[in-house]
Amino acid sequence: MASDIFLLDDQHRMIRESAREFARREIAPKAKELDETGRYPKEIIEKLSEMGFMGVMVPEQYGGAGLDALSYAIAMEEVSAGCASTGVIMSVNNSLVCSPVVKFGDEAQKKRYLPPLASGKRLGCFALSEPGNGSDAAAMRTAARRDGDHYVLNGTKNFITNGREADVCIVFATTDAAKKHKGVTAFLVDKPTAGLTVGKLEDKLGINASSTAQLHFENVRVPEANRLGEEGAGFKIAMATLDGGRIGIASQALGIASAALEASKKFAREREAFGAPIAKLQAIQFHVADMATRLDAARLLTWRAAAKAATDERFTREAAMAKLFASEAAMWITTTAIQVHGGYGYTKEYPVERHFRDAKITEIYEGTSEIQRIVIGGSELAE
Ligand code: CAA
């Protein structure tokens, strides 16, 4: 693979080999069934936890694997190539829940929340979007009112990945709506908690084995000790967290795209037309060439963002570019994979229709392609 030649050290290669081997042996054979039934892949998540993949970047002192963002990107790609639903369950727990606790949590929060999240004993979710706002994250209506040494949360969160199974939610609520984004505060909310209920579960186009739920908060009392960061710091916590999350979704897109490319190459070598395998046809070779080139380019952007995430510098622009390019590449590659398969690609007999359905969400969640362009354009044109 062309993008292997730099950036990866021996440890990264080892992680890739073990993640790939596990994904091929234990995840990919179940992906069709998981897509069809929508069941939570509990047994796979347990094994991923044993491998350290539910807390890849959590420091070892808090029970994590203590690895860097590139290791995380590599593991995410391989797991997602096996099953994209499993990939996003892992991604949310790692980059949207563990990471902000590592970066913004106090010592007590780190000790209490990180070991069970990293070991798979508990699962996390990230509750930012609401029925009335998605891209305009600062426009949230969920409110947190102070009451002595507690806050009382009221509102509804929407499209929450892992929302059905999660035991810990990072919830964003406004403590002062007049201050707009400067009034947003983040909380660690345990589930179950009185007044917190799981509402509607979405019936989706893809990533069916990952739950997408509404969460209702009705007078949910959260101790002050569970506030993550200062009052009013929540919006920046959300944005900085999504920078890391976007590397996870870019990696998920790489996994989906690489599975679609591999399936297409296999099919092209086996399927005959005009007296020879279709792999001999230039029309098919051109498709495969474009798929492989876009995949490598997307991987290079993603690994660059991951490498920068390991520094102290802000990597907002690089993460947005990686997410934008990798998700659009995945959509293009999975569409082309169906074309290479012809009529068979349109059937459930082959996996590429699932890859195509799974790819679409990577252009939407954790910031749509349009939002990534706003972030990149803003950064390019900043004075
Ligand atoms: N890191 C740190 N700070 C940041 C930041 C970042 N990446 N991005 C913005 N900020 C800061 C700004 O510097 C600014 O600070 P000051 O108040 O000090 O000036 C402040 O945050 C407000 O920034 P903006 O004026 O740019 O904010 P905005 O209201 O215009 O919004 C936006 C910007 C880029 C559109 C943002 O709202 C956004 O990213 N929207 C998309 C939301 C999103 O990705 N949702 C995904 C939901 S979660 C999900 O999908 C998870 C799942 O389940 C899989």
Image (cartoon, rainbow, N blue to C red):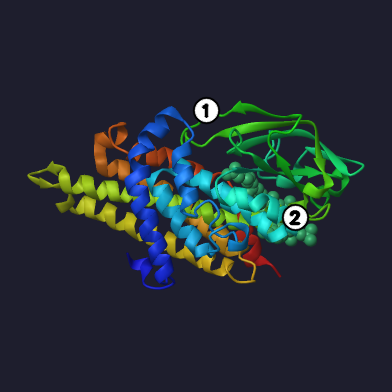
Pick the front one: 358 or 216 = 216
Q: Residue at x 63, y 50 (%)?
A: 97
Q: Is residue 71 left or right of residue 10?
A: right
- Relative to 18, say whether 190 is above or below: above
Q: In front of the other: label 2 or label 1?
A: 2
Q: Secondary structure at mark 1?
A: loop
User: Going by the picture, which residue comes out furthest to the left?
Assistant: 275
Q: Residue at x 50, y 42 (%)?
A: 361
CB of residue at label 2: within 8 Å of ligand 1?
A: no
What is the x, y in percent for residue 321? 54, 60
What is the x, y in percent for residue 240? 67, 58
Asked whether residue 368 is in view, the answer is: no
Q: Is residue 3 left or right of residue 270?
A: right
Residue under pointer 1: 203
Pick the front one: 212 or 204 = 212
What is the x, y in percent for residue 320? 57, 58
Residue under pointer 2: 108
Image quarter (top left, top right, bottom left or bottom right) of the N terminus: bottom left
**Quarter occupied by residue 163:** top right
User: In whole angstroms, how far apart are the C-alphas of marks 2 and 1?
Assistant: 38 Å
What is the x, y in percent for residue 288? 28, 54
Q: How many residues crowd mark 2 within 10 Å: few (<14), some (14–19), many (20+)?
A: few
Pick the front one: 87 or 330 = 87
The image's mark for residue 5 is: none
Q: Residue at x 52, y 43 (%)?
A: 89
| Tag 2–tag 1 contact (CB < 8 Å) | no
Q: Who comes first in sequence, dot 2 or dot 1?
A: 2
Task: Name the amino acid, label 1.
Answer: Asp
User: Going by the picture, which residue comes out furthest to the right?
Assistant: 148
Q: Residue at x 37, y 32 (%)?
A: 33
Asked whether residue 89 is in view, the answer is: yes
Q: Is residue 13 left or right of residue 189?
A: left
